[in-house]
Image (spheres, rainbow, N blue to C red):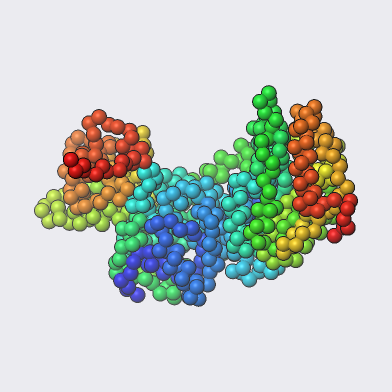
């Protein structure tokens, strides 16, 4: 059914339809509306779930870990510092092979404290063993949650999935969204059947000490499963498209890339802005396009290679940094082509929209303007020169030291 | 040993969530396991939160009434790094028994001080030296902290009283809601005594008043009465207190702690009738 709703509410609706037995979350902006809505659904008897109000994100992640280990479906959501606070549990959940689903409402990392959107939080946890998908808009955020449960709980996968959606832009934005009915959801997503669970009838030991004799093989197994997920996602997306009338590939989306001379690679809601600019520039005869990455982990190298190998100039947008080195997405896109004969002449990297700095169509045009034969590696878009002193003073960046403004004197 | 007693008392319909620590390390080296009941180890500080998730799942499945849930950890995993999650578990009212095996230091990593290390104890991170008498603070009052949450059952016990441990575990499981049991367990390696003295030393901890054996059911106190012995008898048997032995002033400070316990929990058999 089509509804004009806030992103968080739409996500809460789809989570409700997935019938998690246990929900646990700790409030952090901009994730709050999702779990508030779920709490209300439980309070109103619309949703039969155990809603566990925890004292921290560390426990939120631990509660869903314990619940899924007991053989039921679970859900949590977080952002930014919350994700970092549960980081060791995040790795643990993947290592224990528990198909937890978590929404990450993407938000910048402190210091300085900033509640607005970039992708530093989830990108920083890309090595945790979780599958990570990024939504372009609210509809996609809704759909990806359903796809996430289907994928995570598949007997050949059994890995957690993080559904990343840009904070405020998608969590608090309002769009017309098609929210599926319970019948279709039930047909697409069968009840969770655990491969292994804590059950006195059949005792098992989960999370034993594994020494050098076998630890490496457990890592290898997760790696192989990530590869398996890569081959399964397009099939699950195709099933999804059939049931719900969408058009996802699941791994990537190619937008006017076929004959393009210049292509932007990006993840998340910025792709919507890029599409607008691509449409505008195409109408003026410019051969530009977008490659949207939906699945970031596992990283769809082959699909990206096929999409970009004939593109002369590629610009990669990073909304997360690896301070002291090249930005994460740029590094990985470049790595795909290291041993390839066919490759773009230029793969330039742009850092954009950090801490909620608005990414306008003008910002994207600037990226296309800078995408020339000269390869750039760490080009910041929309920096404010007036805030960058010639004699750089560290105190300006130390958590944003600010002085009380002096009153003008009356003399 | 203490864990064995706890599990036996809890019975086969039990799920255990275990903090990282000595117990987890020696009992579950892959591909073997010593656990005959479903058992999970996640991290160092989150066994009570993992158990909260297990309990919530069992409630959803409608099987909670048939299955006991135990969360357990050592003194550090309980009173230091795990305290926040444990407080959350108490405050939310989960039907879980938390068991703390208290050997008074981080033994698994090599005898570093924890919040439950006693006053003036020599550990690797609170060493005695020319400028130090060891640990500078008394034990964190974990049973009181648990009690302050208003939970229905809080108790301490000691590995020297197996029947007491089992009685208390069974009692705990007869009560709905969060329960806390703290069991004193000597660690010969960390306390630096011959393991043949384990029983005797654990008994002295109780008999001196340094480790009160108490029980609060709905806030009402019951205790194991003692004829108090001087703390020196307990201290002199352990290497971790060796630096105190020629210093009556320092010993007196520990005697004061024991005397306070004896008063506070009404432990003394002399001058009052037993409860």
Q: Quadrant of residue B224?
A: bottom right
| Quarter of the image that includes the N terminus of chain A | bottom left
Residue at the extreme top: B130
Q: Looking at the image, is A220 positioned above or below residue A20?
A: above
Give the image location of residue A222, x and y in percent: 51, 47
Q: Is residue B29 visible?
A: no
| Residue positioned 61% across, 41% down in the render | A214
Residue at the extreme front: A411
The number of numbered badges drawn on the structure is: 0
Q: Looking at the image, is A376 positioned above or below residue A80?
A: above
Task: Return the residue nearer the eye: A175 or A1.
Answer: A175
Q: Quadrant of residue A195?
A: bottom right
Task: Return the residue nearer the eye: A312 or B36.
Answer: B36
Q: Is residue A19 visible?
A: yes
**Drawn side of residue A399 relative to residue B181, left or right:** left
Q: Looking at the image, is B203 positioned above or below residue B71?
A: above
| Residue positioned 67% across, 61% down in the render | B151
Q: Looking at the image, is B241 positioned above or below residue B130?
A: below
Q: Quadrant of residue A139?
A: bottom left
**Drawn side of residue A185 relative to residue B9, left or right:** left
Give the image location of residue B2, x and y in percent: 78, 49
Give the image location of residue A177, x and y in percent: 32, 69
| Quarter of the image that includes the C terminus of chain A | top left
| Residue positioned 72% across, 35% down in the render | B121
Task: Return the residue nearer the eye: B113 or B268.
Answer: B268
Give the image location of residue A281, x and y in percent: 14, 52
């Amino acid at each position: 059914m089509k509804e004009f709703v806030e992103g968080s509410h739409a996500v809460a609706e789809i989570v409700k339809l997935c019938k998690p037995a246990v929900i646990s979350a700790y409030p952090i902006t901009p994730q709050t509306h999702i779990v508030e809505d779920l709490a209300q659904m439980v309070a109103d008897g619309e949703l039969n779930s155990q809603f566990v109000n925890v004292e921290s994100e560390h426990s939120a992640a631990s509660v869903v870990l314990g619940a899924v280990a007991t053989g039921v479906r679970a859900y949590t959501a977080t952002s930014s510092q919350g994700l970092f606070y549960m980081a060791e549990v995040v790795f643990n959940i993947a290592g224990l092979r528990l198909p937890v689903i978590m929404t990450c409402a993407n938000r910048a990392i402190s210091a300085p404290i900033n509640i607005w959107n970039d992708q530093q939080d989830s990108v920083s946890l890309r090595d945790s063993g979780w599958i990570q998908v990024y939504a372009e808009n609210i509809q996609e955020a809704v759909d990806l949650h359903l796809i996430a449960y289907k994928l995570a709980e598949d007997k050949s996968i059994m890995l957690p999935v993080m559904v990343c959606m840009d904070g405020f832009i998608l969590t608090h934005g309002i769009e017309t969204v098609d929210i599926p009915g319970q019948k279709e959801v039930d047909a697409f997503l069968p009840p969770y059947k655990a491969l292994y669970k804590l059950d006195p009838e059949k005792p098992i030991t989960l999370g034993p000490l594994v020494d050098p004799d076998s630890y490496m093989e457990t890592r290898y197994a997760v790696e192989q499963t990530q590869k398996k997920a890569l081959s399964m996602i397009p099939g699950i997306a195709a099933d999804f498209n059939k049931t719900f009338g969408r058009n996802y590939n699941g791994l990537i989306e190619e937008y006017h890339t076929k004959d393009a001379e210049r292509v932007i690679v990006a993840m998340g809601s910025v792709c919507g802005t890029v599409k607008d600019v691509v449409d505008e520039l195409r109408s003026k005869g410019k051969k530009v396009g977008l490659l949207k990455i939906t699945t970031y982990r596992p990283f769809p190298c082959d699909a990206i290679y096929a999409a970009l190998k004939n593109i002369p100039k590629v610009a990669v947008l990073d909304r997360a940094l690896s301070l002291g080195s090249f930005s994460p997405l740029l590094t990985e896109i470049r790595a795909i082509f290291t041993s390839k004969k066919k490759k773009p002449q230029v793969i330039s990297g742009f850092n954009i929209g950090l801490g909620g700095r608005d990414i306008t169509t003008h910002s994207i045009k600037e990226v296309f303007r800078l995408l020339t034969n000269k390869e750039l590696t760490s080009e910041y878009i929309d920096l404010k020169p007036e805030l960058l002193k010639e004699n750089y003073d560290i105190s300006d960046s130390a958590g944003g030291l600010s002085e009380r403004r002096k009153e003008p004197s009356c003399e | 040993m203490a864990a064995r007693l706890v599990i036996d008392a809890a019975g086969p319909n039990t799920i255990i969530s275990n903090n990282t620590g000595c117990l987890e390390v020696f009992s579950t080296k892959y591909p073997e396991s010593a656990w005959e009941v479903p058992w999970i180890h996640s991290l160092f500080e989150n066994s009570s939160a993992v158990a909260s998730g297990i309990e919530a799942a069992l409630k959803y499945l409608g099987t909670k009434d048939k299955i006991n849930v135990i969360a357990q950890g050592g003194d550090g995993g309980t009173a230091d790094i795990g305290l926040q999650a444990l407080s959350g578990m108490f405050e939310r009212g989960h039907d879980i028994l938390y068991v703390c095996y208290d050997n008074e230091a981080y033994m698994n990593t090599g005898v570093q001080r924890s919040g439950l290390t006693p006053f003036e104890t020599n550990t690797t991170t609170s060493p005695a030296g020319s400028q130090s008498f060891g640990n500078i603070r008394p034990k964190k009052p974990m049973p009181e902290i648990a009690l302050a949450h208003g939970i229905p059952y809080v108790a301490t016990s000691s590995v020297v009283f197996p029947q007491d441990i089992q009685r208390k575990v069974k009692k705990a499981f007869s009560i709905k809601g969060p329960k806390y049991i703290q069991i004193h367990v000597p660690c010969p390696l960390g306390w630096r005594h011959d393991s043949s003295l384990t029983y005797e030393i654990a008994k002295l901890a109780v008999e001196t008043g340094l480790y009160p054996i108490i029980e609060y059911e709905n806030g009402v106190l019951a205790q194991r009465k003692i004829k108090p012995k001087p703390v020196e008898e307990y201290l002199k048997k352990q290497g971790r207190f060796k630096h105190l032995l020629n210093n009556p002033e320092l010993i007196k400070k520990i005697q004061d702690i024991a005397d306070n316990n004896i008063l506070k929990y009404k432990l003394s058999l002399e001058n009052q009738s037993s409860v």
